[in-house]
Image (cartoon, rainbow, N blue to C red):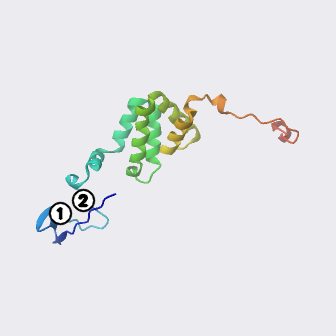
Amino acid sequence: MLTLEKKVKLLYSRSMIQIYYKYEIIAEHQRIKSPHNYTTVAQHMPEAYQNQMDWNPEKFLGQAREIHPDVEHYIQQVLMKKPHPEQAYKSCQGILSFAKRVGNQRLIKACQRAREVGWYNYKTIENILQKGLDRQSHEDSSIEMPKHENIRGKDYYQ
């Protein structure tokens, strides 16, 4: 990866911050003094991040709703599992992108299956789809206990 380092000069006052490169102003921001706050100018962000500026829970829930109510519920749970919804946006985007890659029906089945075990994240959906678990019926996935003299069974404990 090629990194370019350039020296800039930063000038600030009580109300403004100005950034200069070779004596030319390249950025100017209003200064916010309250702690733990920041400002973002969309034009200063890389193009890939500018597309994310309109991400919000309603956007992801709306996209999920268009696929199926079970997908909407799953996305809602993914958003709720994080302390801040913004932390779940990439997971939501990734989960919804499976609709284009594997189709709506497989995504619906994967969300239903993941919901049954109560795991709400991108990796769970990815694993279900990779292993084809969305295509298996639940009877196929049940494991029967082996017959053995040391296994007493449920009647023993009554």
Earlier sequence position, callout 2 versus callout 1: 1
- Which residue corresponds to the image point at 47% horizontal and 27% vertical from the top-left? 105
Q: Reply above or below: 130 against 25.
A: above
Is disc 1 surrounded by few (<14), some (14 to 19) or many (20+) residues within 10 Å?
A: few
Residue 134 placed where, x, y %?
A: 55, 32
Label 1's element?
strand
In this picture, residue 126 sits left or right of residue 47: right
Q: Can residue 120 be seen at all in this image of the molecule?
A: no
- Rendered-image quadrant of the C terminus: top right
C-alpha separation, residue under disc 2 versus residue under disc 1: 8 Å
- Asked if labels 1 and 2 touch by Cβ distance under 8 angstroms, the answer is yes
Q: Can residue 128 be seen at all in this image of the molecule?
A: yes
- Which residue corresponds to the image point at 25% horizontal and 48% vertical from the top-left? 47
Residue 110 placed where, x, y %?
A: 52, 34
Q: Nearer the viewer, residue 42 or 16?
A: 42
- Tell me how many marks there are: 2
Which residue matches tag 2?
Answer: 39
- Rendered-image quadrant of the N terminus: bottom left
> What amino acid does circle 1 point to?
Gln
Residue lying farthest to the front in this orientation: 2
Residue 56 placed where, x, y %?
A: 33, 45
Q: Which mark is residue 30?
A: 1
> What amino acid does circle 2 point to?
Thr
Residue lying farthest to the right in this orientation: 149
Residue 126 placed where, x, y %?
A: 50, 40
Q: Nearer the viewer, residue 25 or 142?
A: 25
Q: Which image quadrant for residue 117?
A: top right
Q: Which image quadrant for residue 14?
A: bottom left
Q: Nearer the viewer, residue 122 or 66?
A: 122
Q: Nearer the viewer, residue 1 or 131?
A: 1
